[in-house]
Image: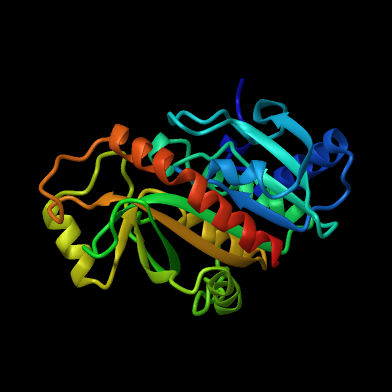
Amino acid sequence: MSNPLDDPKADPFQIARQAAQVIAEKSGIAQHDIALTLGSGWAKAADLIGETVSTIDASEIPGFTRSEVVGHVSTIRSILLPSGKHALVLGARTHYYEGHGVRRVVHGVRTAAAAGVKTMILTNGAGGIKTSWLPGTPVLISDHINFTSASPIEGANFVDLTDLYAVRLRDIARTVDSSLDEGVYMQFRGPHYETPAEVQMAKAMGAHIVGMSTALEAIAARQSGLEVLGLSLSTNLAAGISDSPLSHKEVLEAGKEAEPRISALLAAIVAKL
């Protein structure tokens, strides 16, 4: 079945509004307050933040597609938080390397905004450049370098990204865990891992962690007026920083091992929002 976002003449924001309406109808929740995209290692947080009101298969919502990545679910969950607020957990993440175009990559963020969300939490599993960040270390994203040569913003819309990753939200996260470090995330296109030379280039450009998601989504979130909190799980040392070959299996294993701890951390942060 074709995806409406693949039509270049379609309005991606209108499709996001349609998707938000379907979510409201299927969940029975007219408006959501917080949205989370849970990357490698972070998924269990959805079970800890509150009571699940509804779980919707992504294929039932306009513009969404099932995730093609092992370890990622393809559902949208509506969760009632203890505070009385409602959260959307966007499990159907589309990565840029899947080749579906930027519109599909950022559709979840735009749908969240259309659903009333004001706070967007973006998480991922990534390769660490700092040797002090052992596998399993959670890191706050303070800024990013978008190395995909793409943007979700279409037309002459000039969006300021100066304070894209909210200081306020990072400060809240540190009230939960004062030891949280922060760094600059660099998104590559993927799906291949970076070469050692590319990692050294990223380091020279000011990056501390490298991965294949998040930056494009964060830009779209800012365009939609959302406040953004970014969290990376350093699942491994990046190529050339570690002597070991890289593998997706290693990423999944590191995420699984760290999952109970970092999911509890994220749930505690959400409770303060």
Q: Looking at the image, which residue is at 58% across and 74% down?
A: 175
Which residue appears at 61% of the width and 30% of the height?
3
Q: Viewed as shown, does residue 235 lie left or right of 213?
A: left
Residue 89 horizontal side relative to residue 241, left or right: right
Choose top left, top right, bottom left or bottom right for residue 203: bottom left
The quarter of the image holding the C terminus is bottom right
Identity of the residue drawn at 21% across and 49% down: 194
Image position of 182 with respect to 113: above or below: below
Q: Position of residue 124 (x, y in %)?
A: 45, 50
Give the x, y percent position of residue 139: 41, 63
> Which image quarter is the N terminus in?
top right
Rendered image quadrant of residue 244: top left
- Residue found at the very far top of the displayed protein: 1
Residue name at image x 72 percent, y 64 percent: 118
Foreground of the two, 35 or 64: 35
Does residue 231 appear anywhere in the picture? yes
156 and 193: which is toward the camera: 193
